[in-house]
Image (cartoon, rainbow, N blue to C red):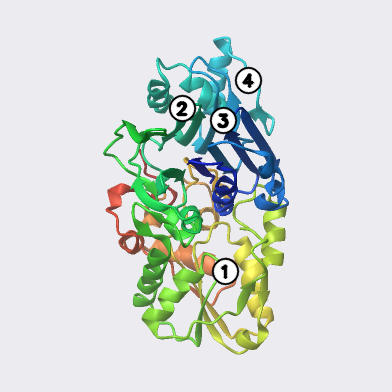
Amino acid sequence: MSGIFGIVSKKNCATDLLYGTDYHSHMGTEYGGMAVLGQRFYRSIHDISKSQFKSKFFEEYKTMEGNLGIGVISDRDAQPLIIGSKFGTFAIVSAGLVENTNELAKKLLEEGETFGEMSSGGVNSVELIAKLINKGQTLIDGIEKLYNHIKGSATILIMKEDGIYGARDHFGRMPLIIGEKDGSYAIATETCSFLNLGYRITKYLAPGEIVHLGRNGLEEKFSGNKKNQICAFLWIYTGYPASSYEGISVEIVRERCGRLLAKNDNVKADLVAGVPDSGVGHAIGYAMESGLPYRRPLVKYTPGYGRSYTPPAQEIRDLVATMKLIPVKEIIQGNRIVLCEDSIVRGTQLKNYTLKKLWDSGAKEIHVRPACPPLMFTCKFALSTRSLDELVARRAIWDIEGRDIDDIRDYLDEGSDKYKKMVDWITREIDATTLRYQRIDDMVRAIGLPRDKLCLHCWIGESE
Protein backbone atom coordinates (compact mmCIF):
# COMPACT_ATOMS: atom_id res chain seq x y z
CA MET A 1 0.00 0.00 0.00
CA SER A 2 0.98 3.67 -0.29
CA GLY A 3 -0.54 6.90 1.00
CA ILE A 4 -0.69 10.32 -0.67
CA PHE A 5 -1.45 13.80 0.61
CA GLY A 6 -1.78 17.16 -1.13
CA ILE A 7 -2.51 20.72 -0.05
CA VAL A 8 -3.56 24.00 -1.65
CA SER A 9 -3.12 26.69 0.97
CA LYS A 10 -3.65 30.42 1.45
CA LYS A 11 -0.20 30.53 3.07
CA ASN A 12 2.99 28.49 3.13
CA CYS A 13 1.86 24.87 3.10
CA ALA A 14 5.05 23.11 4.24
CA THR A 15 4.05 22.49 7.87
CA ASP A 16 0.64 21.02 7.06
CA LEU A 17 2.24 19.01 4.24
CA LEU A 18 4.84 17.51 6.60
CA TYR A 19 2.31 16.39 9.19
CA GLY A 20 -0.40 15.46 6.70
CA THR A 21 2.01 13.16 4.86
CA ASP A 22 3.37 11.78 8.13
CA TYR A 23 -0.16 10.71 9.09
CA HIS A 24 0.08 8.20 6.21
CA SER A 25 3.16 6.45 7.62
CA HIS A 26 1.22 3.25 8.34
CA MET A 27 0.71 2.81 4.58
CA GLY A 28 4.31 2.11 3.51
CA THR A 29 7.86 1.54 4.66
CA GLU A 30 10.20 2.18 1.75
CA TYR A 31 10.21 5.84 0.63
CA GLY A 32 8.83 9.13 1.84
CA GLY A 33 8.74 12.24 -0.29
CA MET A 34 7.43 15.80 -0.48
CA ALA A 35 7.30 18.45 -3.19
CA VAL A 36 6.32 22.10 -2.71
CA LEU A 37 5.68 24.63 -5.46
CA GLY A 38 6.27 28.33 -4.80
CA GLN A 39 8.70 30.42 -6.78
CA ARG A 40 10.14 27.08 -7.85
CA PHE A 41 9.73 23.36 -7.23
CA TYR A 42 11.21 22.05 -3.98
CA ARG A 43 11.44 18.26 -3.89
CA SER A 44 12.92 15.77 -1.44
CA ILE A 45 12.83 11.97 -1.22
CA HIS A 46 14.22 9.81 1.57
CA ASP A 47 14.56 6.12 2.31
CA ILE A 48 12.38 5.54 5.40
CA SER A 49 12.92 1.78 5.69
CA LYS A 50 14.98 2.20 8.86
CA SER A 51 13.68 5.47 10.29
CA GLN A 52 10.44 7.40 10.61
CA PHE A 53 9.25 9.85 7.97
CA LYS A 54 9.10 12.84 10.27
CA SER A 55 12.67 12.42 11.49
CA LYS A 56 13.95 12.49 7.90
CA PHE A 57 12.10 15.65 6.89
CA PHE A 58 11.75 17.64 10.12
CA GLU A 59 14.57 20.06 9.39
CA GLU A 60 14.36 19.93 5.62
CA TYR A 61 10.71 20.97 5.33
CA LYS A 62 11.60 24.34 6.86
CA THR A 63 13.48 25.24 3.66
CA MET A 64 10.41 24.56 1.49
CA GLU A 65 8.12 27.46 0.74
CA GLY A 66 5.01 27.63 -1.40
CA ASN A 67 1.23 27.44 -1.43
CA LEU A 68 1.02 24.06 -3.16
CA GLY A 69 2.40 20.75 -1.93
CA ILE A 70 2.13 17.00 -2.38
CA GLY A 71 3.59 14.20 -0.28
CA VAL A 72 3.73 10.42 -0.30
CA ILE A 73 4.53 7.40 1.83
CA SER A 74 5.53 4.78 -0.72
CA ASP A 75 5.80 1.00 -0.48
CA ARG A 76 7.93 0.66 -3.60
CA ASP A 77 8.84 3.56 -5.88
CA ALA A 78 10.83 6.67 -5.03
CA GLN A 79 8.51 9.68 -5.44
CA PRO A 80 7.35 12.47 -5.96
CA LEU A 81 8.76 12.87 -9.46
CA ILE A 82 9.19 16.20 -11.25
CA ILE A 83 8.21 15.76 -14.90
CA GLY A 84 8.74 18.05 -17.86
CA SER A 85 5.86 17.54 -20.31
CA LYS A 86 3.86 19.17 -23.07
CA PHE A 87 1.42 20.20 -20.33
CA GLY A 88 4.19 22.04 -18.52
CA THR A 89 6.29 20.94 -15.56
CA PHE A 90 4.46 19.02 -12.88
CA ALA A 91 5.09 16.91 -9.77
CA ILE A 92 3.32 13.59 -9.42
CA VAL A 93 2.66 10.96 -6.74
CA SER A 94 0.66 7.75 -6.97
CA ALA A 95 -0.77 5.05 -4.70
CA GLY A 96 -1.61 1.60 -6.00
CA LEU A 97 0.03 -1.07 -8.12
CA VAL A 98 0.47 -1.10 -11.90
CA GLU A 99 0.63 -4.83 -12.48
CA ASN A 100 1.71 -4.57 -16.12
CA THR A 101 4.49 -2.00 -15.60
CA ASN A 102 7.16 -4.02 -17.43
CA GLU A 103 4.89 -4.75 -20.38
CA LEU A 104 3.91 -1.09 -20.79
CA ALA A 105 7.49 0.12 -20.29
CA LYS A 106 8.74 -2.25 -22.99
CA LYS A 107 6.15 -0.90 -25.42
CA LEU A 108 7.10 2.72 -24.67
CA LEU A 109 10.79 1.95 -25.09
CA GLU A 110 10.06 0.40 -28.49
CA GLU A 111 8.27 3.64 -29.41
CA GLY A 112 11.42 5.62 -28.57
CA GLU A 113 10.62 6.74 -25.01
CA THR A 114 13.32 6.80 -22.35
CA PHE A 115 13.08 6.33 -18.59
CA GLY A 116 15.22 8.41 -16.27
CA GLU A 117 13.91 7.03 -12.98
CA MET A 118 14.78 3.47 -12.01
CA SER A 119 13.52 1.81 -8.84
CA SER A 120 14.78 -1.52 -7.46
CA GLY A 121 16.44 -2.30 -10.77
CA GLY A 122 13.29 -1.66 -12.81
CA VAL A 123 11.16 1.11 -14.21
CA ASN A 124 9.64 3.49 -11.68
CA SER A 125 5.89 2.96 -12.12
CA VAL A 126 5.17 6.62 -11.25
CA GLU A 127 7.29 7.76 -14.19
CA LEU A 128 5.47 5.24 -16.37
CA ILE A 129 2.14 6.70 -15.27
CA ALA A 130 3.37 10.23 -16.08
CA LYS A 131 4.47 9.17 -19.58
CA LEU A 132 1.13 7.52 -20.29
CA ILE A 133 -0.73 10.63 -19.12
CA ASN A 134 1.45 12.75 -21.41
CA LYS A 135 0.02 10.88 -24.40
CA GLY A 136 -3.38 12.51 -23.89
CA GLN A 137 -4.66 15.55 -25.75
CA THR A 138 -5.00 17.37 -22.44
CA LEU A 139 -3.92 16.51 -18.92
CA ILE A 140 -7.45 15.40 -18.04
CA ASP A 141 -7.71 13.36 -21.23
CA GLY A 142 -4.38 11.73 -20.40
CA ILE A 143 -5.52 10.76 -16.91
CA GLU A 144 -8.80 9.36 -18.24
CA LYS A 145 -7.04 7.29 -20.90
CA LEU A 146 -4.38 6.06 -18.45
CA TYR A 147 -6.88 3.59 -17.02
CA ASN A 148 -7.41 2.03 -20.45
CA HIS A 149 -3.77 0.89 -20.40
CA ILE A 150 -2.92 -0.18 -16.88
CA LYS A 151 -3.81 -3.37 -15.07
CA GLY A 152 -4.05 -2.86 -11.35
CA SER A 153 -4.76 0.50 -9.77
CA ALA A 154 -3.45 4.05 -9.55
CA THR A 155 -4.74 6.93 -7.47
CA ILE A 156 -2.86 10.09 -8.44
CA LEU A 157 -2.02 13.64 -7.41
CA ILE A 158 -0.46 16.01 -9.97
CA MET A 159 0.79 19.46 -8.93
CA LYS A 160 1.16 22.24 -11.50
CA GLU A 161 1.35 26.02 -11.26
CA ASP A 162 -2.43 26.27 -11.44
CA GLY A 163 -3.07 23.86 -8.56
CA ILE A 164 -3.38 20.17 -7.75
CA TYR A 165 -5.23 17.59 -9.83
CA GLY A 166 -6.52 14.56 -7.94
CA ALA A 167 -7.68 11.37 -9.64
CA ARG A 168 -9.10 8.37 -7.82
CA ASP A 169 -8.44 4.93 -9.27
CA HIS A 170 -10.85 3.87 -12.02
CA PHE A 171 -12.64 1.33 -9.79
CA GLY A 172 -11.93 3.12 -6.52
CA ARG A 173 -9.64 0.45 -5.06
CA MET A 174 -7.96 3.19 -3.01
CA PRO A 175 -9.86 6.14 -1.50
CA LEU A 176 -9.27 9.84 -2.14
CA ILE A 177 -10.89 12.43 0.11
CA ILE A 178 -10.94 16.24 0.22
CA GLY A 179 -10.82 18.38 3.35
CA GLU A 180 -11.28 22.15 3.72
CA LYS A 181 -10.02 24.70 6.26
CA ASP A 182 -10.57 28.47 5.92
CA GLY A 183 -10.41 28.38 2.14
CA SER A 184 -7.44 26.00 2.03
CA TYR A 185 -7.85 22.44 0.75
CA ALA A 186 -6.22 19.10 1.50
CA ILE A 187 -6.62 15.89 -0.48
CA ALA A 188 -5.58 12.53 0.94
CA THR A 189 -6.03 8.79 1.02
CA GLU A 190 -6.39 8.83 4.84
CA THR A 191 -8.89 11.13 6.56
CA CYS A 192 -6.98 10.77 9.84
CA SER A 193 -4.51 13.23 8.28
CA PHE A 194 -7.17 15.99 8.44
CA LEU A 195 -8.23 15.86 12.05
CA ASN A 196 -5.38 17.43 14.02
CA LEU A 197 -4.62 19.88 11.20
CA GLY A 198 -8.14 21.34 11.40
CA TYR A 199 -9.51 20.20 8.03
CA ARG A 200 -13.09 18.99 7.78
CA ILE A 201 -14.13 16.38 5.26
CA THR A 202 -16.02 17.94 2.35
CA LYS A 203 -15.94 15.27 -0.34
CA TYR A 204 -15.23 11.58 -0.96
CA LEU A 205 -14.19 11.26 -4.60
CA ALA A 206 -16.08 8.73 -6.71
CA PRO A 207 -14.15 5.99 -8.53
CA GLY A 208 -12.44 7.51 -11.56
CA GLU A 209 -13.37 11.05 -10.52
CA ILE A 210 -10.89 13.82 -11.36
CA VAL A 211 -10.86 17.14 -9.51
CA HIS A 212 -8.81 20.31 -9.56
CA LEU A 213 -7.94 22.31 -6.45
CA GLY A 214 -6.74 25.83 -7.18
CA ARG A 215 -7.45 29.53 -6.94
CA ASN A 216 -11.12 28.94 -7.76
CA GLY A 217 -11.48 26.29 -5.09
CA LEU A 218 -12.71 22.79 -5.90
CA GLU A 219 -13.62 22.03 -9.52
CA GLU A 220 -14.86 18.72 -10.87
CA LYS A 221 -13.10 17.79 -14.12
CA PHE A 222 -14.52 14.29 -14.63
CA SER A 223 -17.46 12.88 -12.71
CA GLY A 224 -16.13 9.32 -12.50
CA ASN A 225 -17.77 5.93 -12.74
CA LYS A 226 -20.68 4.21 -11.04
CA LYS A 227 -18.69 0.99 -10.55
CA ASN A 228 -17.00 0.97 -7.15
CA GLN A 229 -14.83 -1.78 -5.71
CA ILE A 230 -12.91 -0.27 -2.81
CA CYS A 231 -10.44 -2.53 -1.01
CA ALA A 232 -12.20 -4.19 1.94
CA PHE A 233 -8.83 -4.79 3.62
CA LEU A 234 -8.60 -1.05 4.32
CA TRP A 235 -11.18 -1.42 7.08
CA ILE A 236 -9.93 -4.77 8.31
CA TYR A 237 -6.21 -4.01 8.51
CA THR A 238 -4.38 -1.43 6.40
CA GLY A 239 -6.38 1.68 7.25
CA TYR A 240 -5.83 3.77 10.36
CA PRO A 241 -8.49 3.47 13.12
CA ALA A 242 -9.27 7.22 13.03
CA SER A 243 -9.86 7.22 9.26
CA SER A 244 -13.05 6.72 7.30
CA TYR A 245 -13.68 5.62 3.73
CA GLU A 246 -16.93 6.22 1.87
CA GLY A 247 -18.06 7.84 5.12
CA ILE A 248 -17.60 4.61 7.11
CA SER A 249 -15.35 4.65 10.20
CA VAL A 250 -12.50 2.12 10.33
CA GLU A 251 -12.70 1.72 14.11
CA ILE A 252 -16.46 1.17 14.08
CA VAL A 253 -16.12 -1.50 11.38
CA ARG A 254 -13.47 -3.28 13.45
CA GLU A 255 -15.72 -3.24 16.50
CA ARG A 256 -18.56 -4.69 14.40
CA CYS A 257 -16.21 -7.39 13.09
CA GLY A 258 -15.36 -8.36 16.65
CA ARG A 259 -19.02 -8.43 17.67
CA LEU A 260 -19.85 -10.76 14.78
CA LEU A 261 -16.93 -13.03 15.66
CA ALA A 262 -18.29 -13.30 19.20
CA LYS A 263 -21.88 -13.92 18.07
CA ASN A 264 -20.72 -16.97 16.10
CA ASP A 265 -18.52 -18.30 18.90
CA ASN A 266 -19.13 -20.39 22.02
CA VAL A 267 -15.59 -20.77 23.34
CA LYS A 268 -15.00 -20.61 27.10
CA ALA A 269 -12.27 -18.13 27.97
CA ASP A 270 -10.97 -15.81 30.67
CA LEU A 271 -10.14 -12.75 28.61
CA VAL A 272 -10.11 -11.20 25.13
CA ALA A 273 -7.03 -9.58 23.61
CA GLY A 274 -6.09 -8.02 20.30
CA VAL A 275 -2.76 -8.25 18.51
CA PRO A 276 -1.55 -4.61 18.59
CA ASP A 277 -2.36 -2.38 16.91
CA SER A 278 -4.82 -3.43 14.21
CA GLY A 279 -6.31 -6.34 16.14
CA VAL A 280 -7.32 -4.14 19.07
CA GLY A 281 -10.55 -2.75 17.60
CA HIS A 282 -11.72 -6.25 16.67
CA ALA A 283 -10.96 -7.47 20.20
CA ILE A 284 -12.87 -4.60 21.80
CA GLY A 285 -15.91 -5.51 19.70
CA TYR A 286 -15.56 -9.17 20.69
CA ALA A 287 -15.36 -8.21 24.36
CA MET A 288 -18.39 -5.91 24.08
CA GLU A 289 -20.50 -8.68 22.57
CA SER A 290 -19.25 -11.62 24.63
CA GLY A 291 -19.05 -9.92 28.01
CA LEU A 292 -15.51 -11.23 28.52
CA PRO A 293 -13.00 -8.70 29.87
CA TYR A 294 -10.69 -7.00 27.40
CA ARG A 295 -7.09 -7.13 28.61
CA ARG A 296 -3.61 -6.52 27.19
CA PRO A 297 -1.33 -9.56 27.48
CA LEU A 298 0.76 -8.16 24.61
CA VAL A 299 1.80 -4.53 24.41
CA LYS A 300 3.54 -2.77 21.54
CA TYR A 301 6.83 -1.05 22.29
CA THR A 302 6.46 2.52 20.92
CA PRO A 303 4.95 3.54 17.58
CA GLY A 304 8.47 3.41 16.14
CA TYR A 305 8.03 -0.31 15.55
CA GLY A 306 5.98 -0.36 12.39
CA ARG A 307 3.92 -3.07 10.80
CA SER A 308 5.53 -6.45 10.30
CA TYR A 309 3.27 -7.01 7.27
CA THR A 310 4.45 -4.18 5.01
CA PRO A 311 8.28 -4.46 4.66
CA PRO A 312 9.23 -6.32 1.45
CA ALA A 313 12.11 -8.30 3.00
CA GLN A 314 11.26 -11.33 5.16
CA GLU A 315 14.17 -10.73 7.53
CA ILE A 316 12.91 -7.20 8.25
CA ARG A 317 9.35 -8.47 8.78
CA ASP A 318 10.67 -11.06 11.24
CA LEU A 319 12.80 -8.52 13.11
CA VAL A 320 9.87 -6.12 13.53
CA ALA A 321 7.60 -8.97 14.62
CA THR A 322 10.18 -10.16 17.16
CA MET A 323 10.91 -6.83 18.77
CA LYS A 324 7.68 -4.84 18.77
CA LEU A 325 5.44 -6.96 21.05
CA ILE A 326 6.27 -7.46 24.73
CA PRO A 327 4.31 -10.01 26.79
CA VAL A 328 2.80 -9.21 30.21
CA LYS A 329 3.26 -12.52 32.01
CA GLU A 330 1.07 -11.57 34.96
CA ILE A 331 -1.95 -11.29 32.64
CA ILE A 332 -1.10 -14.31 30.50
CA GLN A 333 -0.19 -17.01 33.02
CA GLY A 334 -2.86 -19.64 33.55
CA ASN A 335 -5.48 -17.88 31.41
CA ARG A 336 -7.57 -18.98 28.45
CA ILE A 337 -7.17 -16.22 25.88
CA VAL A 338 -9.31 -15.27 22.88
CA LEU A 339 -6.83 -13.55 20.59
CA CYS A 340 -8.33 -11.33 17.88
CA GLU A 341 -6.17 -10.60 14.85
CA ASP A 342 -6.97 -8.60 11.72
CA SER A 343 -5.95 -11.49 9.44
CA ILE A 344 -3.59 -14.43 9.04
CA VAL A 345 -1.38 -13.99 5.99
CA ARG A 346 1.73 -16.13 6.23
CA GLY A 347 1.06 -17.50 9.70
CA THR A 348 4.76 -17.66 10.57
CA GLN A 349 4.88 -14.41 12.53
CA LEU A 350 1.67 -15.19 14.41
CA LYS A 351 3.09 -18.58 15.40
CA ASN A 352 6.73 -17.70 16.07
CA TYR A 353 6.52 -14.17 17.46
CA THR A 354 3.02 -13.83 18.96
CA LEU A 355 1.57 -17.15 20.08
CA LYS A 356 4.97 -18.41 21.22
CA LYS A 357 5.30 -15.42 23.54
CA LEU A 358 1.90 -16.25 25.03
CA TRP A 359 2.70 -19.96 25.43
CA ASP A 360 6.12 -19.21 26.91
CA SER A 361 4.45 -16.87 29.41
CA GLY A 362 2.13 -19.59 30.65
CA ALA A 363 -1.08 -19.24 28.62
CA LYS A 364 -3.46 -22.12 29.30
CA GLU A 365 -5.34 -21.90 25.97
CA ILE A 366 -5.14 -19.59 22.94
CA HIS A 367 -8.21 -19.25 20.70
CA VAL A 368 -7.36 -17.29 17.55
CA ARG A 369 -10.13 -15.26 15.88
CA PRO A 370 -9.15 -13.43 12.65
CA ALA A 371 -11.49 -10.64 11.53
CA CYS A 372 -11.55 -11.79 7.89
CA PRO A 373 -11.70 -15.11 6.01
CA PRO A 374 -8.55 -16.99 4.93
CA LEU A 375 -6.52 -15.01 2.39
CA MET A 376 -6.43 -17.12 -0.78
CA PHE A 377 -5.13 -14.90 -3.58
CA THR A 378 -2.36 -12.36 -4.08
CA CYS A 379 -3.38 -8.72 -4.35
CA LYS A 380 -3.45 -7.30 -7.88
CA PHE A 381 -4.10 -3.72 -6.86
CA ALA A 382 -1.58 -2.90 -4.11
CA LEU A 383 1.80 -4.18 -3.04
CA SER A 384 0.55 -6.36 -0.18
CA THR A 385 0.34 -10.16 -0.52
CA ARG A 386 3.04 -10.88 -3.06
CA SER A 387 2.99 -14.61 -3.88
CA LEU A 388 0.70 -17.58 -3.31
CA ASP A 389 3.32 -19.61 -1.46
CA GLU A 390 3.38 -16.90 1.24
CA LEU A 391 -0.25 -17.59 2.14
CA VAL A 392 -0.75 -20.13 4.91
CA ALA A 393 -4.16 -21.14 3.50
CA ARG A 394 -2.52 -22.09 0.19
CA ARG A 395 0.19 -24.06 1.98
CA ALA A 396 -2.58 -25.93 3.80
CA ILE A 397 -4.35 -26.76 0.54
CA TRP A 398 -1.14 -27.97 -1.12
CA ASP A 399 -0.38 -30.22 1.84
CA ILE A 400 -3.92 -31.63 2.00
CA GLU A 401 -4.08 -32.25 -1.76
CA GLY A 402 -0.46 -33.35 -2.08
CA ARG A 403 -0.06 -31.03 -5.07
CA ASP A 404 -0.83 -27.61 -6.47
CA ILE A 405 -4.43 -27.33 -7.67
CA ASP A 406 -6.11 -24.60 -9.71
CA ASP A 407 -9.71 -25.17 -8.62
CA ILE A 408 -9.97 -24.28 -4.92
CA ARG A 409 -13.71 -23.56 -4.83
CA ASP A 410 -14.36 -26.23 -2.20
CA TYR A 411 -11.91 -24.47 0.11
CA LEU A 412 -13.80 -21.18 -0.27
CA ASP A 413 -17.04 -22.80 0.95
CA GLU A 414 -17.22 -22.23 4.71
CA GLY A 415 -19.52 -25.22 5.11
CA SER A 416 -17.45 -27.77 3.20
CA ASP A 417 -15.35 -30.60 4.63
CA LYS A 418 -12.31 -29.31 2.74
CA TYR A 419 -12.66 -25.88 4.33
CA LYS A 420 -12.77 -27.55 7.77
CA LYS A 421 -9.66 -29.62 6.94
CA MET A 422 -7.84 -26.47 5.84
CA VAL A 423 -8.71 -24.62 9.05
CA ASP A 424 -7.68 -27.64 11.16
CA TRP A 425 -4.34 -27.74 9.31
CA ILE A 426 -3.72 -24.02 9.93
CA THR A 427 -4.69 -24.44 13.60
CA ARG A 428 -1.97 -27.04 14.03
CA GLU A 429 0.50 -25.04 11.93
CA ILE A 430 0.23 -21.89 14.05
CA ASP A 431 -0.01 -23.87 17.31
CA ALA A 432 -3.37 -22.50 18.45
CA THR A 433 -5.90 -24.25 20.70
CA THR A 434 -8.71 -23.34 18.29
CA LEU A 435 -9.05 -21.19 15.19
CA ARG A 436 -12.24 -19.73 13.77
CA TYR A 437 -12.22 -17.29 10.85
CA GLN A 438 -14.71 -14.53 10.17
CA ARG A 439 -17.30 -15.49 7.54
CA ILE A 440 -17.12 -13.39 4.40
CA ASP A 441 -20.78 -12.36 4.61
CA ASP A 442 -20.22 -11.13 8.16
CA MET A 443 -17.12 -9.18 7.12
CA VAL A 444 -19.13 -7.48 4.38
CA ARG A 445 -21.96 -6.84 6.85
CA ALA A 446 -19.51 -5.24 9.29
CA ILE A 447 -18.24 -2.85 6.61
CA GLY A 448 -21.76 -1.88 5.65
CA LEU A 449 -21.39 -1.53 1.87
CA PRO A 450 -23.09 -3.80 -0.67
CA ARG A 451 -20.89 -6.75 -1.57
CA ASP A 452 -20.54 -5.59 -5.19
CA LYS A 453 -19.11 -2.27 -3.97
CA LEU A 454 -16.11 -3.99 -2.35
CA CYS A 455 -12.97 -5.56 -3.75
CA LEU A 456 -12.83 -9.04 -2.22
CA HIS A 457 -10.20 -10.43 -4.58
CA CYS A 458 -7.81 -11.54 -1.79
CA TRP A 459 -10.49 -13.87 -0.44
CA ILE A 460 -12.49 -15.06 -3.45
CA GLY A 461 -10.25 -14.31 -6.46
CA GLU A 462 -12.87 -12.27 -8.27
CA SER A 463 -12.48 -8.64 -9.39
CA GLU A 464 -12.99 -6.39 -12.37
- Real-space Cα separation, disc 3 to disc 1, in angstroms: 32 Å
Label placed on residue 125? 3
- Real-space Cα separation, disc 2 to disc 4, in angstroms: 26 Å
Q: Does any portion of residue 149 appear in the rendered image?
A: yes
Q: Secondary structure at mark 4?
A: loop
Badge 3 or badge 2: first in the primary sequence: 3
Say which amino acid is labelled 3.
Ser
Instruction: Please state if 136 lies on the left or on the right of 441 as rendered.
Output: right
Say which amino acid is labelled 1.
Pro
- Real-space Cα separation, disc 3 to disc 2, in angstroms: 25 Å
Image height check: is 225 above or below 280? Answer: above
Say which amino acid is labelled 4.
Phe
Name the residue tied to disc 1: 276
Name the residue tied to disc 2: 162
Image point (47%, 74%), residue name: 283
Instruction: Please state if 17 lies on the left or on the right of 191 as rendered.
Output: right
Name the residue tied to disc 4: 115
